[in-house]
């Protein structure tokens, strides 16, 4: 057996005896995409390595016995004898399952909805709610909805927003919705802030849909 002085044999297999060179297959016969120079690169039938094309293999002409021919290998300086051709397998973690990321994105859009957007961009949604005797109720039909006007009273608006955060779109609901939206849209959670306007529209439609169910299809 021949040994490569550049390999640690605690980690690598022993080198195939070059006497069996006839059993080696040129690499470009197996992998057509390799260049023609790969005809001098041989695949070992015994181990997953490529024989280096920089190595010269010569018959020892001094031996007269034809049945016992030996091979002489000249190693070039600092050239490894074999190179792995087996592709590496990599596994990647789905960042959308990261708990901290989910928590941070949920917090951003939940607090944005309850603290800012329902008082501005989403204010139209507050028309689905009315204040009667200091308590929040949903409108009973579309006619009542059409007659309901936007609030001017900040205290009434706060009561309605609190109602939405507790009964319509809770923080848990927002978390679930954000995850489903990521899967449906194909946008990773860490990119949601870059698509803020689109996410806001989706949240608006979701809250409106839930308010309509409470208003028109529930006895609440």
Image: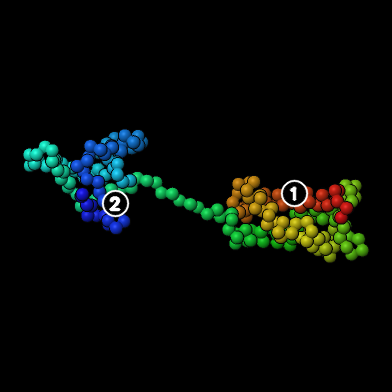
Q: Is residue 112 above or below residue 63?
A: below
Q: Residue at x 74, y 49 (%)?
A: 205
Location of residue 99 by image quarter: bottom right
Q: Are marks 1 and 2 in contact (CB under 8 Å)?
A: no
Q: CA distance from mark 1 to mark 2?
A: 63 Å
Task: Tell me which colouring the rendered structure shows.
Answer: rainbow
Q: In screen coordinates, is 55 left or right of 66?
A: right
Residue under label 2:
13
Badge 1 or badge 2: first in the primary sequence: 2
Residue 63: assigned label:
none
Q: In screen coordinates, is 172 left or right of 84?
A: right
Secondary structure at numbered mark 2: loop
Q: Is residue 116 visible?
A: no
Q: Position of residue 98 (x, y in %)?
A: 58, 58
Q: Is residue 133 above or below residue 43?
A: below
* Nearer the observer, 187 or 154: 187
Q: Quadrant of the C terminus?
A: bottom right
Q: Is residue 153 above or below residue 66?
A: below
């Amino acid at each position: 057996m021949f040994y490569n002085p550049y390999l640690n044999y605690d980690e690598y297999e022993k080198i195939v005896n070059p006497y069996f060179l006839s059993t080696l297959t040129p690499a470009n016969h197996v992998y057509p995409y390799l260049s023609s120079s790969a005809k001098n690169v041989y695949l070992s039938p015994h181990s997953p390595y490529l024989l280096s094309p920089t190595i010269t293999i010569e018959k020892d002409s001094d031996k007269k016995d034809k049945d016992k021919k030996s091979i002489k290998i000249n190693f070039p300086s600092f050239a490894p004898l074999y190179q792995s051709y087996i592709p590496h397998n990599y596994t990647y973690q789905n960042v959308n399952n990261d708990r901290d990321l989910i928590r941070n994105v949920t917090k951003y859009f939940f607090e944005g909805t309850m603290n800012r957007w329902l008082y501005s961009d989403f204010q139209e949604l507050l028309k689905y709610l009315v204040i009667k005797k200091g308590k929040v109720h949903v409108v009973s039909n579309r006619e009542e909805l059409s007659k309901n006007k936007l609030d001017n009273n900040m205290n009434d608006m706060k009561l309605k927003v609190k109602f939405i955060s507790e009964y319509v779109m809770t923080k848990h609901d927002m978390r679930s919705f954000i995850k489903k939206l990521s899967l449906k849209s194909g946008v990773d959670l860490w990119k949601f802030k870059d698509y803020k306007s689109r996410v806001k529209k989706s949240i608006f439609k979701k809250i409106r849909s839930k308010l309509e169910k409470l208003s028109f299809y529930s006895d609440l």
